[in-house]
Image: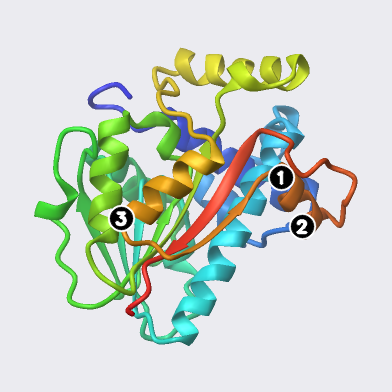
């Protein structure tokens, strides 16, 4: 992203979430603040409606993450850290009493979000705090002070990090038993059939044109190995087939279909 400017891919993700509320009536993921915080007239949003495949993937990953968070809260977790928060609205519609939320993002993107919240008239509850961190240039470990296990929401960020930036942040998440994380990742287009490869490469090209290129890809076995080495002992990884079955009732997608994944990993307190 350009210095002094908010993340343009964060704006793009916000448009996908907002469009899902209108075009699919929030069927997968309901967010009553998504359109409001974006500040774009509904007619303009529909005239430039984002692509359906990416739109429903973003809705599904958010639903998966917030469902997992609800389970974590039910077992006693009281800290949520949103990494690369962008225009995510969870902190402002948080249904869990006692859950504290820390939003972590680049300072330029956070300044933009504060403006959007003010202009949209969205109240910032006292349970929210902000931490301005550039994950590629600063250590999250030096800035994030938590005294209890936390749930980390890390959506739409990993592909834009270098391998070193990803590893450094993941080590912070793995530092405390009881910590849990949900993040999404992309498989390398080079190993995909032509049609899927072209679609993914086109998305990567669009992101690069926004000044935020995709830098990191993973394969499921590789990421499972990295997580296991860091002490995560409960991993749930949903690829295209599993997402289609869970959120769209489709069982016709081959199990090994490559594409975007959303993953939950818990380092148990054992």
* Residue pointed to by mark 1: 56
Cα separation between marks 1 and 3? 31 Å
Question: Which of the 4 quarters of the picture holds residue 47?
Answer: top right
Q: Quadrant of residue 173?
A: bottom left
The answer to whether residue 39 of the structure is visible from this angle is no
- In the image: residue 225, left or right of residue 70: left
Asked if the residue at tag 3 contacts the one at tag 1, i.e. Cβ–Cβ closer than 8 Å, the answer is no
Asked if labels 3 and 2 touch by Cβ distance under 8 angstroms, the answer is no
Is residue 237 visible from the viewing direction of this image?
yes
| Labels 2, 1: front one | 2
SS for callout 2: helix
Can you say whether 173 is above or below 212 in the image?
below
Residue drawn where x is 31% and y is 75% of the image: 127
Where does the C terminus fall, quadrant-wise? bottom left
Q: Give the side of residue 83 with respect to residue 198, left or right.
A: left
Residue nearer the viewer, 37 or 257:
257
State the image quarter where residue 135 is shown.
Answer: top left
Q: Is residue 247 above or below residue 163?
A: below
Badge 2 density bin: few <14, some 14–19, many ≥20, Cα 10 Å: some
Q: How many marks?
A: 3
The residue nearer to you, when weighing 209 against 147, is 147
Task: Return the x and y of residue 138 as percentages of the image width and height.
Answer: 14, 40
Mark 2 touches mark 1? (CB < 8 Å): yes
Earlier in the chain: of badge 2 and badge 1, it is: 1
Q: Which residue is mark 2?
A: 247
Q: CA distance from mark 2 to mark 1?
A: 9 Å
Looking at the image, the residue that sits furthest to the left is: 142
Residue at position x 15%, y 54% in the image: 141
Tell me the residue at 72%/51% (across/down). 243
């Amino acid at each position: 992203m350009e210095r002094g400017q908010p993340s343009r891919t964060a704006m793009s993700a916000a448009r996908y979430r907002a469009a899902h509320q209108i075009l699919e009536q929030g069927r997968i993921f309901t967010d009553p603040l998504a359109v409001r915080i974006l500040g774009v007239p509904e007619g303009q949003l529909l005239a430039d409606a984002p692509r359906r495949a990416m739109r429903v993937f973003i809705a599904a990953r958010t639903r998966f993450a917030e469902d997992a968070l609800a389970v974590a809260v039910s077992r006693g977790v009281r800290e949520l850290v949103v990494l690369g928060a962008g225009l995510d609205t969870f902190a402002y519609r948080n249904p869990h009493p006692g859950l504290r939320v820390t939003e972590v993002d680049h300072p330029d993107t956070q300044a933009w979000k504060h403006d959007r919240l003010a202009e949209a008239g969205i109240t910032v509850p006292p349970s929210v705090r902000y931490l301005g961190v550039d994950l590629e240039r600063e250590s999250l470990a030096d800035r994030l002070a938590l005294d209890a296990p936390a749930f980390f929401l890390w959506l739409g960020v990993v592909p834009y990090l270098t391998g070193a930036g990803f590893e450094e942040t993941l080590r912070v998440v793995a530092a405390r038993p009881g910590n849990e994380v949900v993040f999404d990742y992309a498989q390398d287009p080079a190993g995909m059939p032509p049609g899927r490869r072209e679609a993914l490469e086109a998305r990567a090209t669009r992101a690069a044109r926004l000044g935020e290129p995709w830098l990191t890809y993973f394969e499921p076995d590789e990421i499972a190995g990295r997580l296991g080495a860091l002490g995560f002992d409960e991993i749930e990884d949903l690829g295209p087939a599993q997402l289609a079955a869970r959120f769209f009732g489709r069982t016709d997608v081959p199990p090994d279909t490559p594409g975007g994944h959303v993953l939950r990993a818990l380092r148990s307190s054992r």
